[in-house]
Amino acid sequence: MILYPAIDLKDGACVRLLRGDMEAATVFGTDPAAQARAFRDAGARWLHLVDLNGAFAGQPVNGEAVRAVLGAVDIPVQLGGGIRDMAMIEAWLEHGVARVILGTVAVENPSLVDEAARRFPGQVAVGIDARGGRVATRGWAEETEVVATDLARRFEDAGVAAIIYTDIDRDGAMQGPNVQATANLARAVSMPVIASGGVSRLADLIELRNTGVIAGAISGRALYDGALDLAEALAALG
């Protein structure tokens, strides 16, 4: 199972939100590139970046910070937040992003995901952010009636690289991930599923791995708070 350290960007800084609330942001650093190097030096094989402002605005806002990260490390980076058209997808991939994450458009314009996955094999992931099993979009500000599992199955044959499943109620809360819901989703589809939201200690990662069906996990606050040591976690995951 791959561990993805998270760098969430708000106004150019590294932050973590509590359950997606932009007003409940904790700033952990003002140099995203330095944070990326620190994660790389600890042994990270991937980085997970989110343009939080972009998720609300529907277009890139923290582009300068993202480009700084891309220039600072040589490990692959996946990026989400406000990527909602083909031009934006192409631009980020050309800038060196290894994988773009499409969330809101997966609900509002699923054919774009189909087309992008065909054009860029292995470089398009679908972000499914759910509250109570229902998908939320536009920076989690809008709730839909779409069931998370149904949305994942919609892209079963589209060729997407992964599903990134976030339980919004667990995100940033340090209360542990929703292992059962994530594992159920992973068993419902053939694509790799990456867990996001709530990882707060090493035991959480071990529990996710031991399901045998979850391909990766994203952690942010626990790494910044020191509740989870990245090097130790990577060693434990093997």
Image (spheres, rainbow, N blue to C red):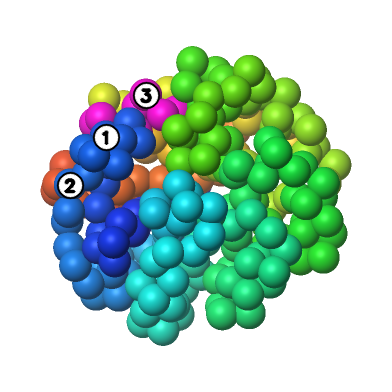
Give the mark nearest the N terminus, 3 or 1: 1
| Disc 2 secondary structure class | strand
Image location of residue 163, percent across then percent down = 62, 42
Q: Name the residue under label 3.
A: 169
Number of residue marks: 3
Q: Residue at x 28, y 61 (%)?
A: 11
Numbered mark located on residue 191 in the image: none
The answer to whether residue 119 is left or right of residue 64 is right
Can residue 12 be seen in this snapshot?
Answer: yes
**Labelled disc at residue 18:** 1
Amino acid bearing label 2: Thr
Against 127, residue 176 (above or below) is: above
Give yes or no for residue 219 being in the magenta stretch.
no
Q: Label 1's element?
A: strand
Q: Which quadrant of the structure image shows residue 148?
A: top right
Q: What element carries label 3?
A: helix
Residue 26: mark in rendering: 2
Find the magenta span and give its range.
167-174
Instruction: Please name the amino acid that badge 3 sits on.
Output: Asp
Residue at the front extreme of this rendering: 57
Work out how far the residue at label 1 is from the one at label 2, CA to CA, in angstroms: 8 Å
| Nearer to us in this view, 143 or 40 | 143
Q: Where is residue 237 in the image (x, y as percent from the top left)?
A: 40, 47
Q: What residue type is labelled 1?
A: Leu
